[in-house]
Amino acid sequence: MKKRILPALGAALLMSISGTSFAASNPFSDVPDGHWAYDAVSQLASDGVINGYGDGTFRGDRNITRYEMAQMIAKAMAKADVSARDKALIDKLAAEFRDELNNLGVRVANLEKHADMVKWKGKLVYTYANKIEEDDGINEKTTVQAGTLRLEPSMEVNNHWSVNARIDYNFDVKADANAVDGSNAANPEIPTTRLRRAWAQGDYNNFQVLLGRLPYETFVDNGMIYDESLSGAQVTFGNKVKATLTAGRSKQFYSIMENDAAVSPTGSYQAIEIYNPREEKFTWGLGYHRWANRDALYAECGTSAINIYDIGLGYRFDKNVSLNGAYAWARDLGHENESVGSSDPVSSEAKRAFSIELDYKEADPADKGSFGIFAAYRQLGHYAVIAPTYDAIPYGHRGLEVGVDYTFAKNLVGTAKYFIGKKMPDENGSGEHLQSSKVFYGELNFYF
């Protein structure tokens, strides 16, 4: 199940690297280059916990000392209502600079440099989804009531490497029973509790590598083509212009609402994406993605692989309003139903995907009363996406999606989304736009 409220984990970790561009000026005069404190302070500055950072230094052009660093940490320690992630960074910095803090009269009790080598976070989420499709006056209704307990441990290996994982336990609220995995709800053989992700991660200046069953959200299009787990490797490098290379094995996932198309074949996946840092005011990116499985594709479209190209653009008008768009197209597709001798061409709609989204604000789990709203128009062609991030719009549909996130209390966030549109022609290019769709999707998230 995809998340809008918080950044995808892979994108969030990438941002923690791109935020260290100021480290080249070495603002810590007596802290060695490459020290993890660079990343930690950059993250706290971007989250607004540490003030004064803006141009790569903290005091004009003058380098900062460990003593001055301790002063900033002391102020950060005195702040209330910081997120769990920022609190962990503050604790780690306090342990590193405990001597300087003690000299300032700030007592750091029971803290060791690596006291947080193993950390746990997660959430409990309840989901309700209702889909109604109308075809020639006949309504077909599908309802899902489910829950997931998600645990996400993070284990520190050294100053550069960590091991991370995600464990999901799914249950069926309506039936009061264990449930199968939501991404393949028609297959009862998939166990309820799954190790969804387990990967090693190395973070260096302007360089990151991930190995294992890792999280992956396509950066260029904000997850329109892919936002799921992938077994393989990923390398990201660059500063002002970034490049991400990804290769491995992945499933072709379908929406939780598409029980009639729940079979998820596995194929090989390769991608290259070139883009600028996502925190810039104007963002851009280009990407190429290849998903191959001859058994799953040849009979449908006369090819053994889907080649997808995409472009993404975004603009942040101010701290509250942003506009993002993405367009993807699949090439080199043959024809449908090769196995029965048909030469029907693949429809243009099945080979195209796009999304235009306007966002206003964002719900912060640590900030009671914060909210975010969005409105978007999307099309998800059958061969132009692999595992899209969206919750309300089903696979193979197009139309309008709107939503709101709201923080009811600290770490208690609700989400409501509504989609209205049409199911596009089948993969074989036949059919008309006869089937209208309406989907309501709701979540209640308890973060810890």
Image (cartoon, rainbow, N blue to C red):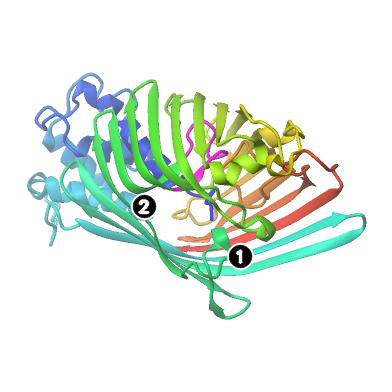
Lateral position of residue 92 relative to residue 145, left or right: left
Pinpoint residue 139: horizontal percent, then vertical percent. Answer: 85, 62
Please state the extent of the stretch shown in magenta in the rendering.
217-229
Residue at 44 percent of width and 24 percent of height: 274
Q: Residue furthest bottom?
A: 176
Q: Disc 2 marks which residue?
A: 82
Q: Residue furthest top?
A: 61
Q: Secondary structure at mark 2?
A: loop
The residue under label 2 is which amino acid type?
Val
Q: Nearer the viewer, residue 317 or 445?
A: 445
Magenta span main SS: loop
Residue 441 is drawn in which quadrant?
Answer: bottom right
Identify the mark nearer the N-term, 2 or 1.
Answer: 2
Q: Disc 1 marks which residue?
A: 186
Residue 81 is drawn in which quadrant?
Answer: bottom left
Residue 79 in view in this figure: no
Q: Secondary structure at mark 1?
A: loop
Residue 224 painted magenta: yes
Residue 349 is drawn in which quadrant?
Answer: top right
Q: Nearer the viewer, residue 53 or 135?
A: 135
